[in-house]
Every structure is written in structure tokens, then in C-alpha cells.
Image: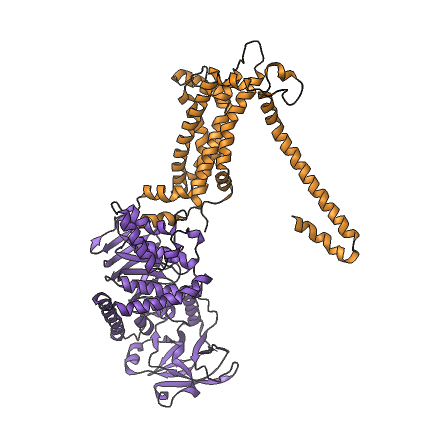
Chain colours: A orange, B purple
Amino acid sequence: MTTTADRPASAPQLATTGTGSARSRGGERRRQVAWVAAAVVIIAYALIPVLWILSLSFKEGDDINNQRFWPSALSLENYRIVLSSDIFLTALRNSVGIAAIATTVSVVLATLAAYAVARLEFPGKKVILGSALAITVFPIISIATPLFNLWRTVGLYDTWLGLIIPYLSFSIPLSVYILSAFFREIPWEMEQAAQVDGATAWQAFRKVIVPLAAPGVFTAAILTFFAIWNDFVFGITLTSTEAARPVPAALAFFSGASQFSQPTAPIAAASVLVTIPVIVLVLLFQRKIVAGLTNGAVKG
Amino acid sequence: MAAIDIDHLVKEYPNGFRGVNDVSLQIADGEFVILVGPSGCGKSTLLRMIVGLEDITAGELRIGGQRVNEKAPRDRNLSMVFQNYALYPHLSVRENIAFPLRLKKGVPEREIQQRVDEAAGLLELGELLERKPAQLSGGQRQRVAMGRAIVRQADAFLFDEPLSNLDAKLRGQMRSEISRMQRRLGTTTVYVTHDQTEAMTLGDRVAVLRKGVLQQVASPRELYEQPVNLFVAGFIGSPPMNFLPAHVRGDQLDTPFGPIDLDERRAAAVAGHDLLLVGIRPEYFEDAGMVDEVKRPVGTTFRAQVDFTEWLGDSQYAYIPFEAEAEVRDRLRSLSQELDSDQLRTQAVVSIDAASRIREGRQAEFWVDTRKMHVFDPRTGDNLTRDAEAGAELTRQVQHDREEEAGAARGGAPAVIDVRGQGAHQAARPGDAIG
């Protein structure tokens, strides 16, 4: 970027000397300042709410009314309240369990389906991919009420399975879409070579295709996990008790230390706690995700 | 080790197109057979049918006497080297080579390592074993692919244009390495290529395919000297055979380069035809001034205008345009299209002595050796003057040589083969650094 900006400016510099180069350097500086300023604004816009929640979570008792950004004194009281609260702990168990099961099932099924979509020619293949894409942009709120009624009739209301099923139906199409693009980039010949080398179709898939598509599988898994972990709509409409209520929904029912105080600070602490696994996952798999989103599956 | 019997194989696609049409070919145990032809002739399809990656529509394929039509690729015990090598990018060179062994149940780890090391030693891959394919040069990848093929001791090796992704220099080295490896292991080999240098130098026998139909299977020499038709004659040889229009006048052929006398056998063969094509290879021509008096009588001389010349140091080519009627022009044009070449004008390429002073744009006198010329029917493309017995004799000789060589390799003259092998290795070294 700097070189392209330099070149037109430095050409007249030879003729006019001095002033031209000063002007172009000034322009360059201004441009850099503008970029930094824009970056700061965007980062601040994204991070201030997070910091605000973090700060709230450390404020003790009435300190949330201190009319300042930072707490007067660091306190872990809210975390103690949250971690000793049954509502939060069972909700956390529900969230972890449901997200883990749904993600695993979704990725396994999607990997197999995407492989079929990428490798086989069958009528209606385009329709399948098209509808997969359509489902990912489908407004889930519109099926929340019908599902509520249906689940109550068939007895899936307020169960883990009752949440896992709708999660699967939304996450599998997206994963199929992502993964089929990955599989399509793996040359047919890899598999054929494996078959000639003595592999069954399943061995060729497991030992050659899946390792090559690993970045794609990771990407799909993490996107699915986040979507389920963060879901509020199904979590609040399809549950009524602690039997299946996940964290985002449970936070709304949080009461705090006593029923007379606003539970703002404990909710902030709970929010911080449920954000931690997501951050850990992102940090752990950052490379893989970036590679998954930007690279093809096979190089060289 | 096994013989491969290709018995009236047909590959028909759903739209009715026949990619391989009734091909029959017997490949003997230990033989090196080349499938060659222009792109789209069905040679790769045929290879993939042998290995089991394409279904067989009709006919029978037998490996070691057993019908394998219905067998999956993994049950045929063949190994294949793909055009782009198809190495597994996530596995090290060692694991790439070990892959086929790991898929077999019950091969102990010790034996796997030992066989990988053996294959690596044979192909000089020792130092590269822990690398990933992405870190290798083209020639090295090629060798890894070969290592993976030989490690399983398969019944036959199949190569699908294995050298086409390498540069010209490396190609020559790998060619000699493949040849050396095949002779040493004595494994039946089917090799697909469109490069006729590979076809001529590697194969015991060469099968020429055209639009899915087998044209001729013979030793390279027989293909060159006794081609069955216009297609084979035009495909084998570089620069290609010249085809001149000719009319029969008594016991002479009237060509753009003057009359050519016919001997009795040829005269009988062409009797009854009107328009013919005479096929004369470039090296049958010579600058008339450079021809021995002794040789002169076996050919005829003519004068012609030289369009231009190419001097290459050891040899020299002159290009002589000639007139041809529309029918011949069309025939030659469609032939050159079929052969993937794009010769636009009707001209003869003649090879003359490098010392010849013939210069472009002038008239010059040429001599042509008519003993080895062939006469083709332009409508059917058939070679009317092919001497089948002489051709078969050429192929028998090659077969004899091969058996002798195989016997020597098995019967204990390994020192000779080793020496030759090392020569090939040393030649391969500098190129690797470049590639």
C-alpha cells in the first residue's frame, strides 16, 4: 500500500524538489493517523461493552451504583454467588452437554453428507446444496412457536433432545455447505491412489480424505459450537425448568444474592464465565480456523 | 508377477460414446508395454480399466489367468503411479511409501520399516524419508510415487503419464530410472504416455491407440519400419513421416518430386489404385551431392525448391513445399489434426547431412532412398506395402533380447546391471538439485 501511494507522489518530486516530497510525506502520515484512529474506534466499540461487563462483575454489592467505569475495589463476591447458584451450574451443565453432543453429531453427519455431495453425482444435488444455504439464513424465531407446541405434544419439551434436534437441523446444512467445498478441492486421485494401494472406500475416507479436510472439519465444528452455545431463542422457548435450560436462557431467570437486590453484577459475572470457554476454543484453534477459512485443503 | 490378458474390452459411456472399443492385448509376465496415442484416444481409460478405477462395459480382463472384471481396485494387487503422483500431503515420505503395507493386515512393523528402507534405497530417497511431499522437488515426488508402487510387490505396475509434469532434462533421467527399475524387478508394466520418445525407448512393445481402437501392437522398431496404416506411420517418428500424393503410372509412381520406380512386390500391391499417398521418412532423403556413388542407384534424385532449412549442429532439416490436390490436402489436414500436430501447409521435411550447403530459397537436388518407403491408400489409410513378416521378425528379436536379459538378471549377472544402475543414478544427481 505504501509503495503504490509513494510512486505517483515521488515522480513530480524529481522536477520540483523539496516541497513535493514534504507534501507527499505529510499525506502519508495523515493517512496512517486516520487508519490508526479508525482502528482504535472500531476496537473500542467492540471491546468497551465487554470491559464494562468485566468491570461490573468485579463490583461488590452497591458498588454498581458508584457511577464510575471501574470498581472501587476488586471483589470476587459475584463469582462466588454465581458458582454457588444451582441455576447457573445446572444451566452450565446443560449448555456444555447439549452443545457437545449436538456439535459432535452434527459434524460427523455433515462430514459424511458433504463427502457424498462432493463425490457423487445424483439428481437433486444442486437442490440439496441450495436448500442447505437457504436453511442457514432461515429466521429461526419463526419456527420457535410451532416447535413449542409440537414438542409439548410429543413429550420432547424441556428435554436435552428437544434442543439438540432443532440445533442439528440448523447446523448440519451450514456444515455440509462448508465441508463440501473442502472435499471438492481434494483431488479424486488421492482417493483412487488409496484404493489402488489397497484401501477400502471407508479406509480411503478415514485415512486420506478426513485428515486432508481437517481444517474444514475444525471450522465447521467451531462455528457449530458457537452457534449452539450462544443460542437464546430455542433455549428460552423450548425449556421451562432446569432440566434442559441452557446458560443464555438461565441468565434471564437469575435472581442474585437476595431477591431484593438487582442481580446485574452476578449476571455480569455469569456472562464472563460462559464467555471463557469460547475464548479458550478460539485461542486454541485460531490457526486452524484461519487456515480453514482462507486456504484450500490441499497444497502442493 | 503376472500376465495381463485384455480380451475385447469395451468402455461405453452413458451417452453411447465408446472410449475404448474392442481392445485385445496380451501382456506377458515381466513385459513392459506402452499404451500410446494422441490425447483422447482412450489410453488412460484403458489403464484405469485395468487397475479397476473404471468399470468395464464388455469384454474380459484377466490378471494371472483370473478374471478380475468385478474385483475392486484393492483386490487386484496392482500398483499405479499417477500423473500428478497423488502423494498424501499429510503423511511423511516414509508413511507415504508405507501406506500400502499398513493397509495390509498382519505385516509386522519391523518388516514395514525394512521394506520401506529397501524401496527408499533403490530410489535414493534415504535422506528425504521424514519430509512431507510439499517439501520435495518434482523429481523427488516422482520417485516417492514409484517407491509407493514398488513397496507392495504388486503383480504389475501401471504408470499414467508419470513424467509429463517434469521438465525435459529430468524426464530423461527419470526415464532411464524407470527402465532400470523395471528390468531389475522384472515386473509386468503398463505405461501410458503421449510422448513418443518414452514410447520408443521404454517399451518392449508399444500399443498405438486411436479413438479407442487399437491400431497396432509391436516393438518400437516394427512400428517405425512397418506401420500398418497412415495413422501409426504419422504418429511414430519425429519429425513425422512425409506423405506425398502419388498416381500410379505403369510401374512408376508419379509424385510431386518426380517419378519413383516401384519394385515388383510394391507394384503388385498398388495395382488397381489411382490416388495414393507415399510415406517417406525424413532420413530417407539426402542432399544428392552428399550421396555415395554406391548408394545412388537404390534411390531416385529430384530437384526442388527449398523453403527453409534448420541447422542443428549434428543434423540439418530442409523444408520442401509441394502441391497437392484438394482431396489429399484435406486428408493430410485431418490426419495432422488427429495426431495433435498442426501442420498447416503441405511440405516435406527432409533430413540432410549437416555439412550440406543447400540453402533456403534455392533449387537443390535431393536423393531419396526408396527401399523403405511405404504406399498408403488415402481413403482407408491402410499400408499397402507393409511387409508383415519382416515386421514380425523385428518384434521377435526384441522379445528374444528381453528374455535373454531377464534370464541374465535372474541367473546371476547382477554386477553388470548394478554398474549400469549406478551410472543412471549419477546422471540423476545434478538434475535433482535443479528440480
Q: Residue at x 30, y 60 (%)?
A: B190
Q: Quadrant of residue A108?
A: top left
- From the viewer's side, name the closer residue of A274 and A246: A274
- From the viewer's side, name the closer residue of A118 and A39: A39
Residue B416 in percent (x, y) is at: 28, 70
Residue B49 visible in the shown view = no
Q: Residue at x 64, y 33 (%)?
A: A42
Seen in the picture, residue A235 relative to A20 is either above or below; the reply is: above
Q: Quadrant of residue B338?
A: bottom left
Seen in the picture, residue B304 relative to A34 is either above or below; the reply is: below
Residue B384 visible in the shown view = yes
Residue A73 in percent (x, y) is at: 61, 20
Residue B95 in percent (x, y) is at: 35, 49
Q: Residue furthest top?
A: A260
Seen in the picture, residue B104 relative to A59 is either above or below; the reply is: below
**Left/right of residue B115 with respect to residue B319 in the rendered view:** left
Residue A209 in percent (x, y) is at: 39, 43
Q: Quadrant of residue B81?
A: bottom left
Q: Residue at x 60, y 23 (%)?
A: A55
**Left/right of residue B125 with respect to residue A6 in the rendered view:** left
**How many numbered markers are drawn?**
0
- From the viewer's side, name the closer residue of B348 and A77: A77
**Left/right of residue A11 with respect to residue A298 in the rendered view:** right
